[in-house]
Amino acid sequence: MLAALLLAIVLAAVWLSFEIARTKRIRDLNAADSYSLAASGLSNAAAEVTNGVPDWTNNMAWIPPGTFWMGSDDGQPDEKPLHQVTVDGFWMDRTEVTNEQFEKFVRARGYVTIAERKPDPKDFPGVPAEKLVPGSVVFTAPSLAELNRERAGEGLDKLNEIPLDDHFLWWRYVPGANWRHPDGPQSDINGREKLPVVHIAWDDAVAYCRWAGKRLPTEAEWEYAARGGLDRQPYVWGNEQKPGGKWLANIWQGRFPAENTTEDGFKTASPVGTFPANGFGLYDMAGNVWEWCADWYLPDYYAHAPSKNPRGPETSFDPNEPGVMKRVQRGGSYLCSDLYCIGYRPSARMKSSPDTGLSHTGFRCVRDAPAPKS
């Protein structure tokens, strides 16, 4: 018991030091500077064209320009106010980037993700060197019985259910966890080739996009594409949560975070494209894994955002973690529950620091190019 407590304290200290160090590294970054085809050295004009459609559009969908209502009057405070936004047309990956796609990038560039890199001792003063090992944060369903045994040993009252106000109860730092080993060093991606790649930090996603000649979507582009032409609807498929009694996304059913009834058929991530596409032909825009966007996160950005092609603010602030710069994530994941985050709604917003990847964090890419010829 004492050893477990000491380990938890050390890991918490590592995590806190990590948050401080990351803020120093990313404070001066600017989203707008990271996303242009010109910077990648690629040219739309150079793309080969077949039947009026460039060859690079394989597995990408054309998202036509349009105006939509962004946000929600019924959602969380950072989803307000509901406001009209106009975006230009763009191409978007039909699915989240998969393990096999990401592996091609890694082999081509020899890229090493942030979760695979050993933390720099200079960024973690006071942390024992043996604790500075590569790894990532993995969801681990907590046990109420085990939690109560620990509480009894500490002289605390018994709980009737797992509290939802302490996410440290179900998230743990696992040495050796990364995109190749999503559940920890004893796991691998054999048989998971079609699953979305996870444990991807924003910086990792940007590196992949540059290699592919693409970029991350802006938050406005993401929500517009997710809605698939359905304006002001609570779900990407319409206004009913379970049309015909059927789940249309991979999310959590049951009492979060300990009981998942898997009514949708999946306990963790599902192969991309398992659930029906939206009106634009995009898959998994609700649930499965969270997807990175280009924008910095501000909770009140909508109140003063431009109405045409908003690119996000030039800085970031999260009132829950002041001082930690964060980027936007969208779409929810297989962990989203109506009892907790409800993040699978198209208007729902999430945020995380750019150098953090978790076991339910992935991405998809977009590209600026002309519309397909009719």
Image: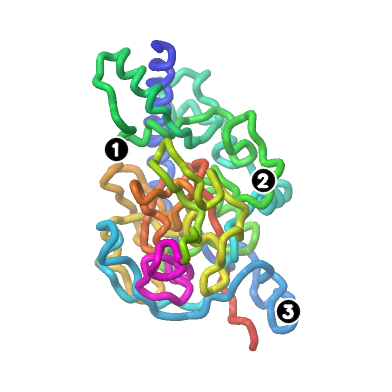
User: Which quadrant is home to the C terminus?
Assistant: bottom right
**Magenta segment range?**
223-243
Q: Is residue 311 visible?
A: no
Determine whether 35 is above or below 353 in the image: below
Q: Earlier in the sequence, mark 3 or mark 2?
A: 3
Q: Secondary structure beneath disc 1?
A: loop
Q: Is residue 244 visible?
A: yes
Residue 143 percent location from the top left of the image: 42, 28
Disc 2: which residue:
192
Q: For the point 49% across and 64% down, which residue is it?
A: 217
- Quadrant of residue 221 within the rendered picture: bottom left
Left or right of 196, for residue 123: left
Farthest front residue?
244
Q: Earlier in the sequence, mark 1 or mark 2?
A: 1
The amino acid type, in three-letter code, at marker 3 is Val
Residue 306 percent location from the top left of the image: 32, 72
Separation of marks 3 and 2 at Cα, in angstroms: 32 Å
Please tell me whether residue 193 belongs to the stretch shown in magenta. Answer: no
Disc 1: which residue:
165
Cβ atoms under marks 1 and 3 closer than 8 Å: no
Disc 3: which residue:
49
Q: Earlier in the sequence, mark 1 or mark 3?
A: 3
Of residues 367 and 101, the one drawn nearer to the viewer in this rendering? 101
Q: Sort mark 3 into few (<14), some (14-19) or many (20+) by Cα contacts within 10 Å.
A: few
Left or right of 266, for residue 52: right
Separation of marks 1 and 2 at Cα, in angstroms: 32 Å
Residue 185 percent location from the top left of the image: 62, 29
User: Which quadrant is home to the N terminus?
Assistant: top left
The amino acid type, in three-letter code, at marker 2 is Arg
Determine whether 55 is above or below 261 in the image: below
Q: Secondary structure beneath disc 3?
A: strand
Determine whether 75 is above or below 322 in the image: below
